[in-house]
Image (spheres, helix red, strand yellow):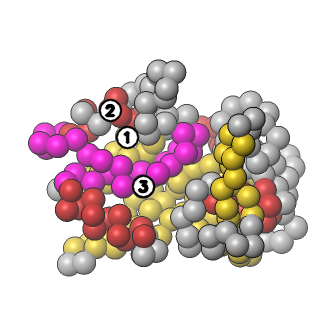
Amino acid sequence: MNTPNILFEDAEALVIDKPGGLPLDPPRAGGQSLALYLEDLKLGFQRPPVPVHRLDSDTSGCLLLARNPRALKRFAAAFETRLVEKRYLGVVDGVPDADEGTITLALSKISSAKDGWHMIPARKGKPAVTHWRKLAVVDGKALVEFRPETGRTHQIRVHAASGLGHALLGDPVYGKHKGGRTLLHAAGLIVPREGKEAIVASAPLPADFAALGFHDG
């Protein structure tokens, strides 16, 4: 796998187009991970860049990396205080009745020895809010734009399955896994910066979305 494409670059930040299926951390069983490419992404700087936020292994698209500890602290605070605008595209296995809406479902983590851990809607869980809009329908599947206000673990995946009533295509935990990856793509990212222009990046729609007949825009 080639080094991920760079979508934005300046002295304190990189935004890369993370390929779907590439985990951020080295898998226990070995294999590819983003960690293998961080040295190449130094691009002449003294330190390798560090991911500011998380994307699931299957999720492709915009991933922000900080080039120094001070930038990392500022960017992490921007995510924590919900200043970052995030735009995701997902293919759901079915067609929502409405054209757009807002999902408000609090989330909580549960785990068991048999099934491992996953997230569930729970009244006493952490608040989670996702705005969504149906963009296109092809062969009984829909391309949906998700704009999460909060950044809970697996938020979009659970909100698609339990809020929309249609899980993301390929999701092995919250849907009916039919091979391939979970079709979720981090299409856009805007990170405001005090005294500097905002970081603005967009990632092109991946080939596996296009193969289903979907296009962004």
Q: Secondary structure at mark 3?
A: loop
Three-letter amino acid code at disc 1? Asn
- Quickly name the residue at label 1: 5
Q: Residue 55 placed where, x, y %? A: 50, 49
Three-letter amino acid code at disc 3? His
Frontmost of labels 1 and 2 is 2
Frontmost of labels 2 and 3 is 3
> For the residues marked 1 and 2, what is the alpha-carbon distance in whole angstroms?
11 Å
Question: Does residue 148 appear left or right of residue 111 in this picture?
Answer: left
The answer to whether any part of residue 135 appears in the image is no
**Residue 50 magenta:** yes
Give the mark nearer the N terminus: 1 vs 3: 1
- Quickly name the residue at label 2: 37
Q: Quadrant of the N terminus?
A: top left
Question: Does residue 121 appear left or right of residue 151 in this picture?
Answer: right
The answer to whether marks 1 and 2 mark residues whose Cβ atoms lie closer than 8 Å is no
- Residue appearing at x 47%, y 70% in the figure: 85
Give the mark nearer the N terminus: 1 vs 2: 1
Three-letter amino acid code at disc 2? Tyr
Q: Residue 195 placed where, x, y %? A: 20, 78
Q: Residue 129 placed where, x, y %? A: 64, 73
- Residue appearing at x 47%, y 21% in the figure: 30
Q: Which residues are magenta?
A: 43-68
Give the mark nearer the N terminus: 2 vs 3: 2
Nearer to me, 195 or 116: 116
- Residue appearing at x 79%, y 71% in the figure: 99
- Quickly name the residue at label 3: 53
> Quarter of the image holding residue 77?
bottom left
The answer to whether marks 1 and 3 mark residues whose Cβ atoms lie closer than 8 Å is no
